[in-house]
Image (cartoon, helix red, strand yellow):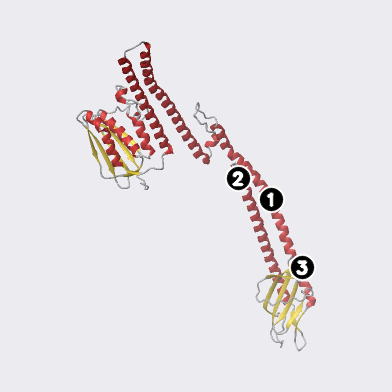
Amino acid sequence: MTRKSIRRRLVTTVVLSQALLALGLLLAGVLYTRKRLLSALDSRMQAHATSLAALARYTEDPPEKLYFDKTLANATLDPDLDDAYAIWADQSGLLTRSDNWPKGLEVSRVGNSPWTFDWKGVPYRGLRLSEIPVLDREPDTQAPLENLSIVYASPLFPLQRQVQEAGIFIAGMSLLLLSITTWFALWGIRQGLLPLQQLAENAALVSTHNWQLQVPKDANQVAELQPVVQSMQTMLLRLERSFAQQKEFLGNAAHELKTPVAVLKSTLQSLLQRPRASEDYQRGLENSLEDLERLERLLQWMLRLARAEQWAHGALRLDLQVIDVTATCEEAVERVRHLAQERKVDIHLTKDGQVPLRVDPEDLQLVWANLLENAVRYSPEGRSVEVEIQHHDGGPVRITFQDHGPSIPADDLPHIFQRFYRGDASRARSTGGFGLGLAIAKALVEAYGGSIQAESEPGQGTRMTVELPITSDN
């Protein structure tokens, strides 16, 4: 796969933008220069054409006729420009043409706006002046009053040469400025990316022994790098916490596995030390089988917790069906009913209809069963455990589990959802479990985007509240 370079992309973008800017300036400069030169040429042509009108006069002897004094024409025109002209009178017709008037060129353009035309490959700028009165006229002249029409044409070669020279000058300056700005852009990009390079070098120093990201001073001063730095720090914080949790999990798991394995090993060693009666072997094997069953349960809980935590980090299955949350609560109550009867504790379920949710019913039943078992185990005999399901349109579904047993100490309350945590030191392994039930319940609830909270006050018991979001696909 071809790697893409941010620096190369930025340099290419800057160079192209500067080249387009230079090209635009060149085009604008040439067009503006040509426009100004044409305007100056039109003004000059109009001044020369007006001066030619003054050379039209009447003869002194009758009958008076209109004629053009061509002997004075050279004094009004610049001979180096090679301009051409033709003059017509309303009644007399064509009065005169310049000697260099293009042969065969007939102009009948109406209006006084300048125009451009080609004659046998030569570009010309043309101008027509109409309704110009004859200025040299005696008051007693009997000749009819006539107006003049003048067509003045000037070749565009000099103007084109000036435009070309201006274009070459502007192009040269644009290339010079392009080179200078490109060099400054390369230097600026190199300096601008230097904090990112330093940040990457410091990030490479992060390891399992050093989770601190040393942010360079320059990177802290770059506004665009602040989101990157904050994201990296947040990511490292989560990785460090996850790594610590994994180490803690492995340590706790090894500790929990060590005890049943040691007991099992001791039981088997005692059976092998000397010959025993068949009853002793049977009793020892039964004890060993109980230890193996406990070990198997511990492994199952650990695997279930690992799966739940994977789901909580985005690995949740997508082939889930819409089920009724109320039905899962009812099934969990039936699963815990036998334990509640043994401890003489009543379970009351309050519901307000069906609540559809896209989840795995076994996951919810496991959550409800864990919460119910804890509530029943810590409820005094003769008391009750209340389970309430609440759901309002547009809001999440809320399930609460309220017991009336001893409250959880305030120091233990923030830690009850941690793995292998046992706040009550008096809980034996036979009755207290492994300390994984609430951790699994929390992981499963968070896997579906929900939350679980515990509240406990002296004399009031403990309340567990689970909230699960109801989305549009439910």
Q: Name the kind of residue labelled 3 in the image.
A: Leu
Q: Quadrant location of the N terminus?
A: top right
Which picture quadrant has residue 367?
A: top left
Residue at image position (38%, 17%) is 265
In the rendered structure, are the residues bearing label 2 and label 3 in contact, judged by CB atoms less than 8 Å apart?
A: no
Mark 2 or mark 1, earlier in chain: 2
| Element carrying mark 3 | helix
Label disc, if present, on residue 175 of the rendered structure = 1
Task: Check whether the beta carbons of the residues at disc 1 and disc 3 lie within 8 A of each other.
Answer: no
Q: Amino acid at mark 2?
A: Arg
Q: Is residue 115 left or right of residue 77?
A: left
Question: In the picture shown, does residue 386 fall above or below 253?
Answer: below
Q: Amino acid at mark 1?
A: Leu
Where does the image place residue 177, in percent across and percent down from the top left? 67, 49
Where residue 397 appears, as percent x and y from the top left, is 31, 42
Seen from the viewer's position, the closer of residues 258 and 175 is 258
- Residue 81 is marked as 3
